[in-house]
């Protein structure tokens, strides 16, 4: 595909940003590099031959310049509690779509809470959490729901064989913990709860080849924000394999290291989504490699659909609300192996 659209990638020099940059170019987009670190941005511009426009979230004029004459902006720069609102404000001023890859529960809540009406009135599409956490689970849950209009509960189990966090993941996690005062979060009875007790540890029967694994229950991710925005499911629970939880909790776990020509790490994942209604159950499964790398085709496919007018709503929308979920997931066949009901 040759789109030719110029698209600002904010945080282009970060770990996930570089994956997004490469995928955007592969899909025919012309990225405009932006971010807060002028030195790293200029080095990336020399490496790629792309235009660089340094911008600071504290300088609205610099953000306006970064987005000028572009068709959309993808925000890859965390912590999103700091960057999402200023970059989104600039997108609204420019009248262009905004997408981000935020995994922070609180930052995503802020986007839905504070920008929904303004984005809708401006007729601008805003898709937060268009990433492995938040976007993928929402698409899988939406596809699993199929023709059901309601469900009793949704379970999203993350089977990560390891989790070597980036610097951005660690800093974003620290911001979230401060905002919730060290408490954990769960979504039950149609609302978010903050809890001080320890999360449960149980076993989840993942499909092959992973099989049954110990998981930390109520290891809550952005899915509890994205899924309830459009699916009437009062209980949304997420789970994480204990190996991954140990990795991300350990201060000495190294950052991800590339093992292939695409820059992906050796990490593998299996996302198992189960939706239940009454006595019935539906399941959707995705398998792949490297949670940071797979975020790139997710957000770039969303970008392509937004700019091509293939969305179901305007304003602030989650992935499953904005797009045809089964079709979207199948479009990622080069990056994900997906099993859907029916």
Image (cartoon, grey):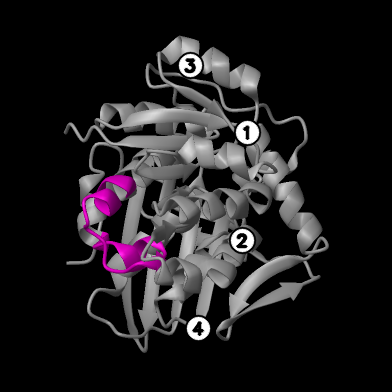
Q: Which residue is nearer to you in this view: 60 or 163?
A: 60
User: In the rendered image, which quarter contains the N terminus?
Assistant: top left
Say what secondary structure mark 4 lies in: loop
- What is the spatial separation of the Cα atoms under label 2 and label 4, in whole angstroms? 17 Å
Q: Image point 43% across, 43% down: which residue?
A: 73
Say whether disc 3 or disc 1 marks the residue closer to the N-terminus.
3
Q: Earlier in the sequence, mark 1 or mark 2?
A: 2
What residue sits right under mark 1 in the picture?
Answer: 166
- From the viewer's perspective, tell me whether residue 12 is left or right of residue 38: left
At a point 50% along the width and 23% down the height, the residue shown is 52
The nearer-to-camera label among 2 and 4 is 2
Separation (CA) of disc 2 from disc 3: 32 Å
Give the spatial CA distance, label 1 vs label 2. Answer: 18 Å
Give the percent coordinates (x, y) of residue 213. 52, 53
Q: Position of residue 313 (x, y in %)?
A: 31, 69
The stretch drawn in magenta includes residue 117:
no
Label 1 Cα crowd, 10 Å radius (few <14 / some 14-19 / many 20+): some
Residue 316 is inside the magenta segment:
yes
Q: CA distance from mark 1 to mark 4?
A: 32 Å
Q: Nearer the viewer, residue 299 or 125?
A: 125
Mark 3 to mark 1 CA distance (whole Å): 22 Å
Report the residue marked by disc 4: 234
User: Are dots 2 and 4 in contact, CB under 8 Å?
Assistant: no
- Residue numbers of the magenta segment: 303-325
Extreme-top residue of the structure: 46
Tell whether label 3 touches label 4 (CB within 8 Å).
no
Which residue was labeled with disc 3? 45
Tag 2, which secondary structure?
helix
Q: Earlier in the sequence, mark 1 or mark 4?
A: 1
Residue occupied by mark 2 = 105
The answer to whether residue 36 is above or below residue 239 is: above
């Amino acid at each position: 595909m040759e789109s030719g659209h110029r698209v600002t990638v904010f945080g282009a020099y970060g770990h996930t940003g570089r994956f997004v940059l490469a995928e955007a170019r592969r899909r025919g987009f012309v990225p405009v590099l932006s971010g807060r670190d002028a030195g790293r941005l200029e080095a990336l511009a020399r490496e790629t031959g792309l235009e660089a426009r340094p911008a600071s979230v504290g300088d609205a004029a610099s953000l306006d310049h970064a987005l000028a004459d572009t068709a959309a902006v993808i925000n890859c720069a965390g912590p999103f509690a700091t960057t999402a609102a200023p970059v989104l404000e600039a997108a609204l001023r420019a009248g262009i779509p905004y997408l981000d890859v935020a995994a922070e529960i609180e930052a995503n809540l802020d986007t839905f809470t504070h920008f929904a009406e303004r984005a809708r009135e401006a007729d601008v599409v805003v898709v937060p959490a268009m990433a492995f956490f938040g976007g993928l689970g929402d698409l899988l849950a939406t596809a699993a729901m199929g023709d059901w209009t309601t469900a009793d509960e949704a379970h999203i189990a993350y089977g990560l064989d390891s989790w070597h966090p980036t610097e951005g993941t660690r800093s974003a996690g620290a911001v979230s913990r401060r905002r919730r005062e060290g408490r954990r979060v769960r979504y039950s009875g149609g609302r978010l709860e903050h809890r001080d007790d320890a999360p449960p540890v149980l076993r989840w029967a993942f499909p092959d080849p992973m099989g049954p694994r110990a998981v930390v229950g109520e290891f809550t991710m952005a899915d509890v924000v994205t899924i309830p925005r459009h699916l009437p499911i009062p209980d949304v629970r997420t789970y994480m394999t204990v190996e991954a939880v140990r990795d991300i909790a350990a201060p000495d776990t190294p950052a991800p290291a590339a093992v292939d020509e695409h820059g992906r790490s050796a990490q593998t994942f299996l996302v198992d989504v189960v939706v239940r209604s009454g006595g019935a159950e539906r399941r959707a499964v995705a398998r792949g490699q490297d949670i940071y790398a797979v975020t790139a085709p997710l957000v770039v496919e969303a970008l392509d659909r937004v700019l091509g007018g293939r969305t179901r709503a305007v304003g602030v929308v989650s992935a499953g609300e904005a797009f045809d979920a089964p079709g979207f997931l199948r479009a990622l066949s080069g990056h994900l192996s997906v099993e859907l009901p029916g």
